[in-house]
Amino acid sequence: MHVVVLQFPGTNCEYDTKYAFEKLGAKVSIVWHEEKSIPSDTTLVVLPGGFSYGDYLRSGALAKHAHVMDAVKTYADNGGYVLGICNGFQILTETGLLPGALKRNDNLHFISKHHHIKVVSNDNKFLQELNVGDVLNIPVAHHDGNFYIDSDGLTELKANNQVLLQYCDSDGRNQILNGSVEQIAGICNKNKNVFGLMPHPERAMEMLLGCDDGIKMLNGFLK
Amino acid sequence: MKAIVNIGLKKGVLDSGGKATHHTLQTIGFGDLVADVRVGKQIIMELNTTDKDKAMAEVTKMCKDLLANTVIEDFEIILEA
């Protein structure tokens, strides 16, 4: 298992992400955005959280044109697994590897706290270790996490089990966090090899820091 | 030639910034006058061409590829000699 974590100027979760996957037993490399290729033995590419290119223009918009993204697109088109967390999710929607877009939170606040999310679909590599309906406690920290997709797009997402996670309360009842369509917190593409979510599983790896529900999530990639 | 690009959220996509600005305009006494507020952004570019058709075609490409996110935003291009 060789996890490649991308690093753009302004990325700030690459070392947490490296720590998380190393804890699970993976070999992890951090790859700078100017690289034109990724290692040939890559088994997962992670676009971590942060503020790539200062979030100028739109969150994730400038990272779309980074050199390394051409290699990531080719990797994903060939069926390679790609995970975008927070800013990484924004980059994946901007790139078109995932449908929809992430808008400014409806209340205009930067939201930073632990929040519950529930598993909506698990017929995919990422959440295979979890059951539908499982409630997880995972930190969120974002300003632009308000997932938008038009009604045709939403119908398609649901028809293909592409809605992965929804914001909820501790009992699993849907709860509005940031204005996302149907409280969506994470999705995947149609082929189920590209995943994106706003919450940060890599920050929920140690009970010392309050919660380790992230282990159950990220572990799916190592199975 | 100058290109002015106006970008805003599509109709039907909730503009929270516009809504908050509208609310504040109401609280400072402009509620009767202002029916709706949309907040967008403007990008102004100096272009090295005098060819209007070329400018329009190229700036349209820029908008689709980078300047606007057409999933949620509309754009308008104004060219000035």
Image (cartoon, coloured by chain):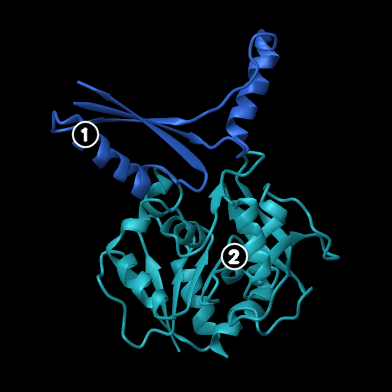
Chain colours: A cyan, B blue
Residue B36 is at least partly visible in this image: yes
- Please indicate, yes or no, whether residue A9 appears anywhere in the rendered image: no
Residue A153 in picture, x, y percent from top left = 60, 57
Q: Secondary structure at mark 2?
A: loop
Q: Residue at x 49, y 83 (%)?
A: A22
Q: Residue furthest right?
A: A171
Residue of label 1: B53
Query: Are the residues tagged 2 and 1 within 8 Å (C-beta)?
Result: no
Amino acid, disc 1: Asp
In front: A216, or B26? B26
**Residue underneath mark 2:** A200
Q: Is residue A187 above or below residue A106?
A: below
Residue A115 figure quarter: bottom right
Q: Does A44 sit left or right of A200 as displayed?
A: left
> Which secondary structure, mark 1?
helix
**Residue shown at 51% from the left, 80% from the top:** A21
Residue A125 in the figure: left or right of residue A83 = right
Q: How many residues crowd mark 2 within 10 Å: few (<14), some (14–19), many (20+)?
A: many
Q: Nearer the viewer, mark 2 or mark 1?
A: 1
Position of the N terminus of chain A, as image quadrant, is: bottom left
Is A198 above or below relative to B37? below
* Amino acid type, label 2: His
The image quadrant where one finds the C terminus of chain A is bottom right
Q: Who's the residue at 59% across and 54% down the image?
A: A141
Residue A24 occupies quadrant: bottom right
Residue A44 spot, x, y in % from top left = 45, 80
Instruction: Work out how far the residue at label 2 is from the one at label 1, CA to CA, in angstroms.
Output: 46 Å
